[in-house]
Amino acid sequence: MAAGVRLLLALASHLGHGAAVAPVEIGSFAPAATPSADIENLTASNFEEKVLRPVNSSAYMAIVLFRKGHFFLELYRNAKSRFDSGVRSREFLLFRPLRFFVMDCTNQANEEICQRHTKGRYPSLMSFRGPYVQRFNRFSWYQESVSYWVGRASRPAYIIVENMEQWLGQEDQAVPCFLLVVSKPDPELLLRYEALAMELMEFQNFHLAVDNGGEKWKDLPGTRPSIHFIANKELHLEAPPFELAFDQDLMRPWVIISSLPTVRHQINFYMWELIPIGWSVVV
C-alpha cells in the first residue's frame, strides 16, 4: 500500500465516521464524474429529501439556485454546461458527486424555505455540503464566473501533500496556498482547519502534511503544528509573520491579508475577500 494511501486511511480513522469532509491526497481524485442530469426542480415538500438529507449523509453535494423570474435560469443552465465540460476535461476536480437544483421563489408554497436561505436576496446561488453552506457573492453574474465558483466550491477542503517537492509544486497554482503541518492527526484541529478552508476556499487552496520527524519537512521551520504559505511569484504576495494559534478569528484575517497585495485596484469583486476580515480598509 502506498505511503499516501496509508496516511489517508490513518487520517480518516482519526477523524472518525461521519466527519464532514474527508482529507484527499494529491493525485487521488476519483475519475471525472458523469455529468448529472439536467437541473432538477425543488419544492418545499422535497427540499429536505433532495438536498438536506443527502448532503448531510455525504451522498452528494448540492448547488441550488433560488430564483424569481427566468433570466438567471438560462444563465444557470449555461454555467452548468460549462462546468460539466470542465469536469470532463479535468479542469474541475470533484471529490464527491454534484447535483444541480433550482427553486422557484415566486411560488408561495416555497416562500418560507426561500426566505430562510436567501434572506430575501434574489437570485441566490448556494452550495450545500455537509454542515457547510456557501453563497455565490459576486456582483457579476455570467456563466464563466458561476462555473468557476461551482468548481471552487466542489473541490476538497484540503489536500494531503507527502513531501517538499509536492508542496513547492503548489507555487504554480493560480491562487495562494496554505499548508498545515502536524506531528499527528488531531481530530479537533483538523475539523477547525477544515471549517476555515471551507469558508475561504474560493480564493485559496489548503493543504495538510504529517511530520513524523526525520528529514522530510526539515526545511519548514517551527514547532508542530505549524502553518506555511506559498504563492506564485507573479502574484507578488508575502505572508506576514504568524505564530499558529488555531483561533479562526485570528487565522481568518491572516489568511486573507496574506492573499492580497499591499496595494491593489479595488473593485466590487474583491470586496467579498475583505469583508470577513472585519478590519478598517483605506481605499
Image: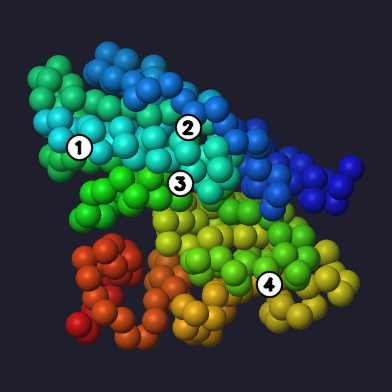
Q: Image quarter for residue 10?
A: top right
Sequence-first disc among 2 and 3:
2
The kind of residue on which mark 4 rests is Leu
Image side of residue 214 versus residue 46, left or right: right
Q: Residue at x 25, y 67 (%)?
A: 271
The residue to which callout 2 is attached is: 98
Say what secondary structure mark 3 lies in.
helix
Q: Residue at x 54, y 75 (%)?
A: 232
Mark 3 neighbour density, 10 Å: few (under 14) some (14–19) many (20 or more): some
* C-alpha distance separating marks 1 and 4: 41 Å
Mark 1 neighbour density, 10 Å: few (under 14) some (14–19) many (20 or more): some
Sequence-first disc among 1 and 4:
1
The residue to which callout 3 is attached is: 151
The kind of residue on which mark 2 rests is Leu
Q: Where is residue 160 shown, x and y percent of the image?
A: 69, 55
Q: Residue at x 26, y 48 (%)?
A: 142
* C-alpha distance separating marks 1 and 2: 20 Å
* C-alpha distance separating marks 2 and 3: 10 Å
- Where the C terminus falls, by quadrant? bottom left
Q: Residue at x 46, y 70 (%)?
A: 255
Give above or below for 189 relative to 97. below
- Give the mark toward the camera: 1 or 2: 1
* C-alpha distance separating marks 2 and 4: 30 Å
Mark 2 neighbour density, 10 Å: few (under 14) some (14–19) many (20 or more): many
Say what secondary structure mark 4 lies in.
helix
The residue to which callout 1 is attached is: 72
Give above or below for 158 relative to 35. below
Residue 89 seen from this side: yes
* C-alpha distance separating marks 3 and 1: 19 Å
Q: Nearer the viewer, residue 4 or 150?
A: 150
Sequence-first disc among 3 and 1:
1
